[in-house]
Amino acid sequence: MRKIVIPVFCFAVMSTIAIEAQLSAAPVSAAQVTIEKTQYVNVSSGTLNMRKSGSSTASVVAKLTKGTKVSVSSESKGWAKITANGKTGYVSSQYLSSKNPVKATAAAKTTTKYVNTSSGTLNMRKSGSPSAAVVTKLAKGTKVSVSSESKGWAKVTANGKTGYVSSQYLSTTNPVKATVAAKITTKYVNTSSGTLNMRKSGSATASVVAKLAKGTKVSVSSESKGWAKITSNGKTGYVSSQYLSTKNPVAVVKTTTKYVNVSSGTLAMRKSASTSAAVLAKLAKGTKVTVSSESKGWAKITSNGKTGYVSSQYLSTTKPVAATPSEVKPVIKYVNVSVGSSLNLRKQPSDSAAVILKLTRGAETTVISESGGWTKIKVYGGEGYVNSSFLSADKPKTPISEPEETTIIKFVKVSDGSSLNMRSEASTSGSVVTQLVNNTAVTVYSEENGWARVTANGKTGYVSSAFLADTAAETPSGSNKTIDKIVTPYNLSLNKMVDFQMAADAQTDKNYQTYIREDALTVISSTKGTVDGIGWRVRGGAGPENWVIATVNDHQELTILSKKMGSDGYNWYEVNINKSWVNASPDDVKYNLNPDNFANDSVNMFQFVKLSQPTSLNASEVNERILAGKGILANQAATFITAGETYGVNEIYLISHALLETGKGTSPLATGVEVNGKTVYNMYGIGAYDGTALTSGAQYAYNAGWFTPEAAIIGGAKFIANGYISAGQDTLYKMRWNPAGAAKYGYATHQYATDIGWAAKQVKQIYNLYSLLDSYHLTVEIPAYK
C-alpha cells in the first residue's frame, strides 16, 4: 500500500492537472477510492459560485444557495472540489461547513415582538438598509418573529413574508392591546360658552370631526401635550384637555329663583341671548323664573315649562309688590319746547348733570316721579330727568308744513285744427316749449293767476288755465273713430288676486307711515336709532297684522318720528326708512287692480286697449300729426302700419315705444351707427343695456340685420310681439297683472313690471297720440273678476 500511495502523492505535487487527467483516464481501483465527506454551503447572503477550476477567474458552473448539500472529494489551497446537484466543480472552502446553516438557523430560537409605531405603518425592507426595497408595510400591533438583530435592524417574518425592519419600532408587548387595556376615564365637556371642537388629530389646525356641547360625557383614552384622545357619540378624535372636567358642569349648575320686575308691559323670553331672536313667551311682572346661568346681560331661565333667555336687568331676587289700580295707569306727558329746540334728558335732577339725549317737541314720555322742579321720566327705552316746566299733559301742536304737490289730469280744450301753446314761464312772453292739440291730456301740478304748470308728451311748462277742461271733449259726430268694448271674465276673485300680488311684493313709489317694533332698535337720540340684528321688517302700522313695507339692515340708521303702543303690547316707532320703492299696501294694490276704477275714464281706459290688433290708421294723418318733425321717424307711418299688420301689434303702441326710446327720432341708435363697415338702426332700444346702450344696441341691430330704418321698425316689432303680446298679454293691464296666469297657476307670474301704477302711467302718452288722429278703430278688453 505504501508503495502505491507515495508515488502518486509525489506526482500530484508536481501537477494537479496531470493527476486529474490521469484519474479520469485510468480506471479507479478499490485501493484508490477515498471516502468523500458531506458539507453544506454556508454563505451569509446571496449564493456561492461553483467554478470550473479552483480559481476566482474560472467560469461559473452553477450558483449554490445557502444550506446546499455538497460532496467534497478534495481540498487544496482554499479550494474544494465538490459535487452538487449532479454537477462537479470547485468552490471556496471557507464557505463550506459540516452543519447545515439553514437548519441551524431554523432551529435557532426566535423571539416574538410587535410593531410599535406612533402613527402610520412600518416598512419591511428587502435588506437592513433604509434604501432597500419595501417588501410590505406592517400596521401598529402586528406580531412578528425576529430571527436576528444587528446594527439597528431586525430580520423578521410576518404575514408569510421575511425582511428587515428598524429595531426601534419593535416592542415585546402589543401596543394596541395595551392601549385597549389601558384605563379609560370618563370626563365631561366644560366650556364657558359655545361648543368644543373634536378634531381629527391633536392640533388646533386639524379638521373638526364634531362639536360637543357643554356637559357632554366623553371617554378619555390618553392625554398628551394638552390634547386628550376621546370617544363620544360613536366618534373618536382629539380635544383640548383644558375644556374637560371630572364632574358634569351642567348637572352641578346651581339654579336660583328670581322674579320678573318690569316697570310696565311684559318681558320677552327669547330663543337665544339676542334682541333679534324669536320671542318664545311674554312674562308678566312678578312671574317666578328659574335662572340656570347669566352672561353678558342675559339670563337663561325656565318658566311655565319653557326655557329661553331674558334681559338680566329685569329680574330681581324678591318678588315685586303688586301695583295698586291707580298705579297701573301710567302718567303720560309730552315735551313742550319751542319749535326747532330740544329738551335735555339728564342723568341726575340737576342742570349740571350729564345729558343722556335730547328730546324733540312733542316727544311722549312716561312720568315716574316729580320733585323739586324735576321730573323723572321714561322715554325711548331709557330713564332720566327733565325740567318739569317743559312737560305738558297735552301734546303740543306742530306747525303744519306746506302740503305736498298734488297732480290731476285735465284736457286741452281748443278748436279742431288749432293748438294751445305750452310756454317756458307763466307769461305770454315766455318761449313756446311745444304746442298741444285739442283733447291732449296734461298733468296739472299747480294753477295760479290764470296759468297752469303742466306736463304733456314728455314736456313740462305753462299753459293758460282757460283752455283746460276737467273732461275730454266727446268725439265729434261723423268722425271715423270707433271703440269696441268686450268683457273677459276670470275664475278668480279680486281679493284673491290682491293676495297673489301681495305675496309677490308688488311695489310702489308712494310714501307710507312706516313702523318698526321697539326691540328692533337701539335708540341713540330722540330722533335717531340703529337697527339691532338682521331680518327686521318695517310695517304699515303699529302691529304685526299690518303689511310688510320693507326689510331693514343690521346697524342701519333710521329717523324716529314718533312712538305708539302696538296691537301686540309692544311699543312701535314710526320711522323714516328712506326707500324710493317699497311694498304697496293691500288697499293700493286693490285700487290699481280693480278695472272699475279705470274702464270709464277717457284716459285710463287705454290700459285695456288690445295691442294685438292693428287699428286701421290713416298713414298720411299719422305722418302729418304725429311723426312730423320726429327725426328719422318722420314719414315712417306706412312702415309702422306694415309692422303692426305683419306681427299683430297696435301701431300707436309701436310708435309710442319708438318715440320714447329714440328721443323722438334723434338718438344715435335711431339715426344710425356703423358696425363692421355697415350702418345699423335700432328704433326700440332692443338689446341696449345700461352702461353700454350704444354699443350693445348697435351690435344687436347688426346681428338682426337691421341695415335700414324700415328693417329696424319692422324687425323690432317682431321682438316686441314675441315677448308678451303673442303670449296673450295684449293689453297694458294684462302685461302688468297677467290675470290669466294667476287664475291658472294660483300665484302672480310673468308680469312686465312690479310697480302697481305701471299700466296707468303708460296710458297718457298713448291717449295723446290717438287724440291727434281723426281715424282709428280700437278694441278695449275689460277684465271681470268673480
Image (spheres, rainbow, N blue to C red):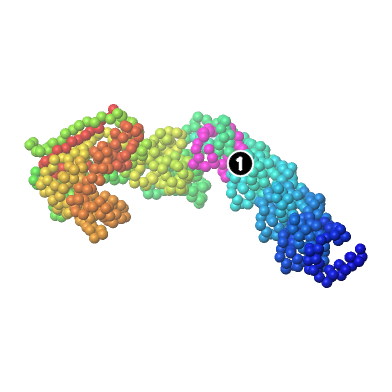
**Residue extent of the magenta highlight:** 271-299
The answer to whether residue 314 is left or right of residue 131 is left
| Residue at 74% from the left image edge and 49% from the top image edge | 144
Residue 308's image quarter? top right
Taking the view exactly as shown, the residue that stands out farthest to the right is 2
| Residue at 25% from the left image edge and 58% from the top image edge | 675
Whether residue 656 appears in this view of the structure is: no
Residue 478's image quarter? top left
Q: In the image, residue 82 lies at what x, y percent? A: 79, 60
Residue at the disc numbered 1 = 213
| Residue at 82% from the left image edge and 56% from the top image edge | 38
Near-viewer residue (720 or 204): 720
In the image, residue 622 sits, relative to residue 597, either above or below, namely below
Amino acid type assigned to the residue bearing label 1 in the image? Ala
Per the image, is 594 magenta?
Answer: no
Q: In the image, residue 244 lies at what x, y percent? A: 67, 45
On-image quarter of the C terminus: top left
Per the image, is 296 magenta?
Answer: yes
